[in-house]
Amino acid sequence: MFAEILKVIRLLGLRRAARLKRRHEQGLTYVRGYTATCCWWALLTSGFLDALQQAGRLEAPRFAAHQRWNPAVLEAILTYLDGIGLLRREGAWVALTPAGRVLLAEPRGLLELAWAYEPPLANLDALLRGDKQYGRDLQRRITYVGLGSGRLCEQLPYRVMRRMVLAQECKVVLDLGCGDLAFLAGLCRADPTIRCHGLDQSAEMVEFDRRQLQQHDFGGRLSVQQGDMFAWPELPVGVPSVDCITACDTFHEYLPDAAKIAGLMRGLKERFPSAVFVIGEFCRQDPAWLRRRRTASLEHHLWHELSGQQIGAARQWRDIFRQAALHLVAEDVYDLIGHGYFTLR
């Protein structure tokens, strides 16, 4: 190997050889990140990684045969992920490395959310040329929006919002845009007397939720229904009078029509006059601040802009709440993650 390096240096010169190596490694950072993400997505969304995590190790050829997968493709993926240190191969057997286990922990939600927005990312050239339009020709993967958001929000946003709900001693919570029900499930675990009901307009998401509720619905204290919150759907008979209305990262999708959001909140207040509102929403961060810190908000802002969504500043949310004739009881804004939490009456 050393002799080969000397041959390259003699051919190119030391300075040029070092420069080429440095630039190649810089480019490889992005190429490897993309390639590794695609391979990880394939094994994550197919259930392979969950099975691997649960079993400790798997015999790859047998798993491929059981799933009727192409064994050569699986072999290529596993060999690559072994090479970059996310999996470890021992003959036919495969196991997660410590680095792989990390990706299945806290960063998992980020990878799931990236998969949710993969359709516009994979069609950037067509979107750029105008050959395709988001909404007409392609959509995000809504179930993975719920799953990824739920996992990420569990790290801080849901914890802050649950604290706000419990501080108001609420007992019947209606969650708008409930996603994968992770927020409400956490409330049910925190307070054995609370009753929670989720509303989501996605039939796909609600079907996913109902399958989860078949396994555990907290003794009937957690339920879900499909419906458009702007269409004033009737709640099930088993849901008593609502005293808390929550929404986490739901309203920003309608931010181009702020009056519509304010009107919804006014109407909900008329319908449930004693209810307190606990709202969590994205708050736009300054681009200059993000340029210095380069947090995941950069990707998050891009995904939202590509899918026609907007992210409002904290002052915009306060203006909407005032338009809805709601009084701000408490506020907790985290500029670090670009998120704000508001308790309103």
Image: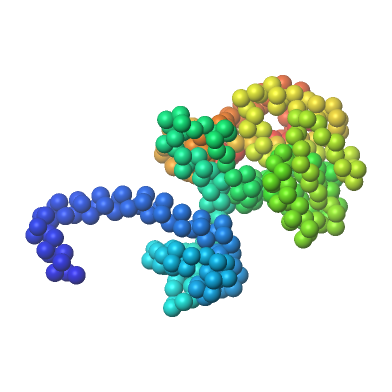
**Residue ranking furthest to the bottom:** 91
Residue in the foreground of this view, choosing between 66 and 42: 66
Image position of 62 (left or right of 209)? left
Relative horizontal placement of residue 142, taking residue 243 as reference (left or right): left
Q: Is residue 9 visible?
A: yes
- What is the x, y in percent for residue 109? 57, 52
Position in image of residue 86 (x %, y %): 45, 64
306 up-or-down from 153: above or below: above
**Quick one: 226 or 30, which is closer to the camera?**
226
Instruction: Name the residue: 78% across, 25% down.
Output: 266
Residue at 11% in and 63% down: 7
**Percent from the top left, x then y, of residue 285?**
52, 34
Q: Residue at x 69, y 46 (%)?
A: 204
Question: Where, by quadrant of the figure, is residue 319 drawn?
Answer: top right
Residue 190 in sight here:
no
Residue 122 appears left or right of 213: left
